[in-house]
Amino acid sequence: MNINVMPFSLNFHCHALIRVFSLVIFCLAPPLYADETSSWLDAVTVSGYAKLVASSPNRAPTAVELDDLSLFVSGKFNRWLNPFLEAEAFKIPLWEESKGAQFNSAQLVIERLYNDIHITDDDTLRAGKFLAPINHWNIIHAAPLVWTTNRPVTSSYSRANYVTGINLRHDFDALAGHALEVYWQPVEEFNPKPLTEHERHYKTVAGARWIAHEDLDYYLGVSFQHADVAHINETRNSISIDGNWQHKWFELESELLFTQVDTDQRHYRHHDWGGYVQMAVPLVNHFSLIGRYEHFEFANKPAATDTALGGIVYRPVPRLSFKLEWQQTQGSVYQNQTGLYSSIAVLF
């Protein structure tokens, strides 16, 4: 069995960071509890999620894989010490047409590792590796919480999805979700996923996100990101707006993105741009009908991509979802080919 751990268990810096993280929790947390009947472990939460995917693309074998298996460990001790760790195993093949049962490889990564410091009631400083606040989809990306098995290209392709550095968030109105986040990555991402999962790695990143409103009725956000691509001479400046509106009879979601690409590499145009519109309509007995259309133009591909998706989601409880969808893709295919996709996702 081939376990592709990337720089996970073999990487000294990864081990060192986790050990320091654990030592800080062990040394600082116990004094926070004066009551001898309570334990510092009471402030620690362990959870996670799993996503099982079956795919049948038109030009590839039908396959079943454990796409994500994530473990979350978090602690809420005081204003200074609120650590969070997410370790993920992904792309674990289980069965493939004409090959039978697989389970012959796995990839592991530390997806998030950070600490939150609550400077004031309205200001939070985050340091470590975390999800870049580029849009709502990236922040809530766990499979049981999103509507489709396949993610829109607009939501992830052009920008850094992770940041290794610091993030400062200021809440103007916590009830309305009105907030501003500013983040900075001074060095290359810690323990990144391989380039088979992302188009590129980034050496430095800086950005901001203004959340105009975010509650159960709707959200609206505007994001900017400046990123220098690792190992090549390329700079990407992105601006986007994304939003969601939840009505009694439907949920409407959309994002529009433009990225200026400055590079000495061969490109067909000097920008990426695109957007999508997605609608979820509740049916009966926890079933929902999903539809999405997306158009995206790549700087480094000759043709744009047009994707139409239709599907059904069964969500008996918020933490569990069953999804079945057909996706039709024309033009330059980045990841999601035309075909039938289904998945089961659960939070635990």
Image (cartoon, rainbow, N blue to C red):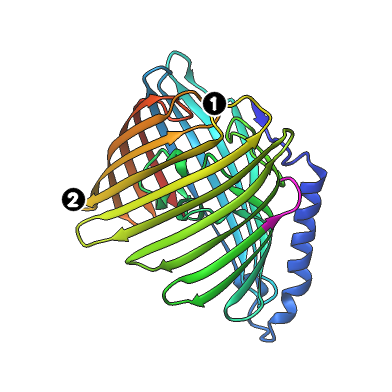
Foreground disc of the pair 1, 2 = 1
Q: Which residue is mark 1?
A: 268
* Residue situated in front as seen by the camera: 33 or 177: 177
Secondary structure beneath dot 2 equals loop
Q: CA distance from mark 1 to mark 2?
A: 44 Å
Sort mark 1 into few (<14), some (14-19) or many (20+) by Cα contacts within 10 Å: few
Farthest residue, direction top: 98
For the point 55% across and 28% down, which residue is it? 300
Residue 150 position, x and y percent, is 41, 38
Mark sitting on residue 114: none
Question: From which residue to which does the magenta span run?
Answer: 184-188
Kind of residue at badge 1: Tyr
Residue 103 placement, left or right of 177: right
N-term-proximal mark, 1 vs 2: 1
Residue 170 position by quadrant: bottom right
Counting labels gives 2
Residue 180 position, x and y percent, is 55, 68
For the point 74% across and 45% down, which residue is it? 188
Quick one: quadrant of the N terminus?
Answer: top right
* Residue situated in front as seen by the camera: 346 or 254: 254
Residue 128 placement, left or right of 207: right
Q: Is residue 271 on the magenta stretch?
A: no
Q: Which residue is mark 2?
A: 283
